[in-house]
């Protein structure tokens, strides 16, 4: 619950910026008159000039740092490319923690911070086997029921991947021998927040010089494959929202990704 320390100078900024009206001013001091209205956003903590507002249930809050130049940030965003070539080198624990710091910096609805993270290193081959086995079955079913050329092309790949994995233990068309999978897990209500956290993490990975790939194939497999869900020990209602494949890149791109013009409608 929000509390106020003696260092409060009664400036009223916390009450002024309290959108749901949980904080009110009384006799020149802020008071949490409507605790039921508090959504835990932490704005009162962030706006206080004297660090006089705190709530132990919300987690830590640090002074604002230097804002990066907009052109540098845009350059970083545009230079991010999907990486499918990784060095045989582990992602350090310090790097992983910094990636997770970026993830938790993501804004969430009502500051719920409900995303759960799973870092996979040792059991990557196990997940790869389960995913490719599942894709092989999906591919076989598509080939039996579909006439769509694009679907049939993917189906042939799925079946081939599953068979090739059985005879070539090093074959890896999903994770490309990366040393780390970072999974973003949430229930249905937290799906958008988890996806946003993954986007923040991708930018931090780019800033740190790490290679990153969003594996849509594995994310789709995890949604339908009970064996994968059991291996990951997902709770009822939880699902993998994003799977980021991470490692030190063994490729160097020379130009930014080509992007089509923005489609903008003005009202």
Image (spheres, grey):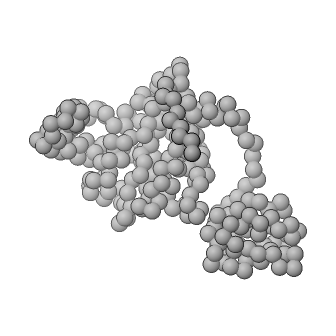
- Left/right placement of residue 242 relative to residue 144 reads right
- The front one of 57 and 165 is 57
Q: Residue at x 71, y 34 (%)?
A: 69
Question: Picture quarter containing residue 58?
Answer: bottom right
x, y percent for residue 135: 23, 43
x, y percent for residue 142: 17, 41
Q: Residue at x 31, y 59 (%)?
A: 230
- Left/right placement of residue 127 relative to residue 49 reads left
Q: Residue at x 42, y 48 (%)?
A: 242
- Left/right placement of residue 4 relative to residue 210 reads right
x, y percent for residue 160: 19, 33
Q: Residue at x 42, y 40 (%)?
A: 214
- The front one of 160 and 2 is 2
Q: Is residue 261 above or below residue 204?
A: above
In the rendered view of the protein, which quadrant contains the N terminus? bottom right
Question: Picture quarter containing residue 37?
Answer: bottom right
x, y percent for residue 224: 27, 53
- Left/right placement of residue 240 relative to residue 50 reads left
Q: Residue furthest left?
A: 144
Q: Is residue 191 above or below residue 166?
A: below
Q: Does residue 97 show up?
A: no
Q: Is residue 123 above or below residue 160?
A: below
């Amino acid at each position: 619950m929000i509390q106020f320390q003696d260092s409060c100078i009664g400036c009223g900024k916390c009450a002024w910026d309290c959108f749901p009206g949980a904080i009110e001013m009384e006799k020149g001091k802020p008071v949490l008159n409507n605790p039921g209205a508090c959504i835990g956003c932490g704005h009162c903590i962030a706006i206080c000039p004297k660090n006089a507002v705190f709530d132990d249930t919300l987690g830590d809050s640090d002074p604002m740092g230097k804002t990066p130049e907009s052109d540098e940030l845009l350059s970083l965003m545009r230079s991010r490319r999907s990486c499918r070539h990784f060095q045989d080198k582990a992602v350090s624990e310090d790097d992983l923690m910094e990636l997770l710091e970026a993830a938790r910096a993501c804004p969430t609805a009502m500051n719920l911070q409900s995303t759960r993270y799973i870092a996979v290193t040792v059991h990557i081959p196990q997940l790869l086997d389960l995913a490719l086995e599942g894709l092989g079955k999906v591919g076989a079913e598509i080939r039996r029921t579909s006439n769509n050329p694009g679907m049939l092309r993917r189906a042939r790949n799925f079946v081939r991947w599953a068979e090739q994995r059985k005879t070539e233990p090093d074959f890896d068309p999903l994770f490309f021998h990366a040393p780390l999978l970072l999974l973003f897990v949430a229930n249905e209500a937290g799906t958008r927040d988890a996806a946003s956290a993954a986007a923040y993490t991708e930018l931090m990975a780019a800033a740190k010089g790490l290679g990153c790939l969003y594996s849509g194939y594995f994310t789709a497999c995890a949604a339908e494959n009970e064996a994968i869900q059991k291996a990951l020990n997902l709770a009822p209602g939880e699902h993998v929202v994003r799977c980021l494949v991470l490692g030190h890149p063994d490729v160097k791109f020379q130009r930014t990704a080509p992007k089509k013009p923005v489609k903008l409608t003005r009202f």
